[in-house]
Image (cartoon, grey):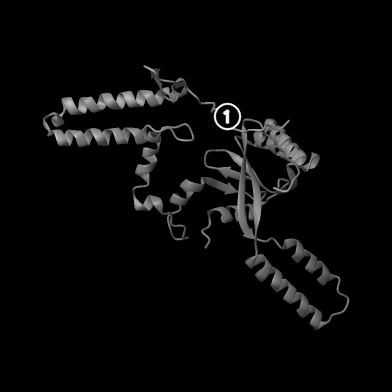
Amino acid sequence: MAKSIYKIPSSLDRSFLDHEIALSGGGWQMRPLPLKVILFWAGSIMAMFWVLTSTFLKDADFWLLFLIVIWWFLATAFLGKYSKTKELKLKSVPALINYVSPSSRKVVTRTSADPSHFYSIVGIDEVDESGLITWADGTVGRAYLVVGAASVLVFAQDKIAILDRVDAFYRKIDTTAEAIWLTTKEPQRVYRQLANLERRNQRLRVQDPELFELMEEQHAILTKYVGGSFTSIHQYLVLKADNLEALRRAHTVVRAEAEESSLMIKQLTQLEQEDTNEMFRAVYTLTS
């Protein structure tokens, strides 16, 4: 049965410092705070007193000490804030330092540019002819073009059935593999229409120049107008696993889900090398 409320479960790497403690006393009570936030505040205040009493600042004027105390408390409040991902803002400081340099904020992707910066973002070593993706960390994966069943127009019973099916699907996925969903807005795919146009061309029994001209016009409309000007939403599923065996098991689960029911996945198409590169190109290419 589908749940009425969904939430992000606690992380598996939750430590003792992540436990929340409610501070209270004298008729007042604060909202529960993680233990690491409390320790961070305590350590920051002790460090502030040491700086103000045991360094050269102890001989500074009162107004300067007052400004330092105000700044210290504001910095502690910002760095000690608990983010939505249950992490201290302090952990984002190293990433902030890396982005101070303008070269770190802009990645040049010209063919003549150094590819190491772009590689550090993507981390993909190779996409072979079969569509097997190899990442720099040793993991492997495959990409699929999927068509789902969810919609804002479905009835309540259908919505519950879809949620139950999705919940059952994720329970089947092994912990050694993960499912990554990508949603892009790309030009409409017209390869089926082009294939049908080619079949019509091969079945022609009359070699009429006007018919050839008409089909060439239809081909140009499909490739340059429909396939270039009109965009539609495409959804991809990327299976990423620790090794080939784990990827094979995850592929079996996804394939069985598409064959047994259309509640979660109506259509599943495994992508080969060219289509996989097109998928990544839609994600990493700057479009106007």
**Which picture quadrant has residue 206?**
bottom right
Residue 256's spot in the image, x, y percent?
77, 38
Residue lying farthest top?
Answer: 26
- At label 1, which amino acid type do we have? Pro
Residue lying farthest right?
Answer: 205
Towards the viewer: 209 or 22: 22
Residue 165's spot in the image, x, y percent?
73, 36
Badge 1 marks a residue whose secondary structure is loop
Towards the viewer: 118 or 128: 118
Residue occupying the point 36% across, 38% down: 93
Residue 24's spot in the image, x, y percent?
40, 18
**Which picture quadrant has residue 139?**
top right
Q: Is residue 193 left or right of residue 59?
A: right
Towards the viewer: 231 or 177: 231
Residue occupying the point 43% across, 50% down: 117
Q: Residues within 10 Å of mark 1 (few under 14, many from 20)?
A: few
Residue lying farthest bottom?
Answer: 209
Residue occupying the point 77% across, 78% down: 214
Q: Is residue 6 left or right of residue 42?
A: right
Residue 266's place in the image compared with 185, above or below, is above
Judging by the rendered image, the residue that carries numbered circle 1 is 9
Total numbered badges shown on the rendered structure: 1
Q: Is residue 37 left or right of residue 209?
A: left
**Which picture quadrant has residue 92?**
top left
Towards the viewer: 73 or 133: 73
Residue 185's spot in the image, x, y percent?
61, 56
Q: Is residue 134 left or right of residue 208?
A: left
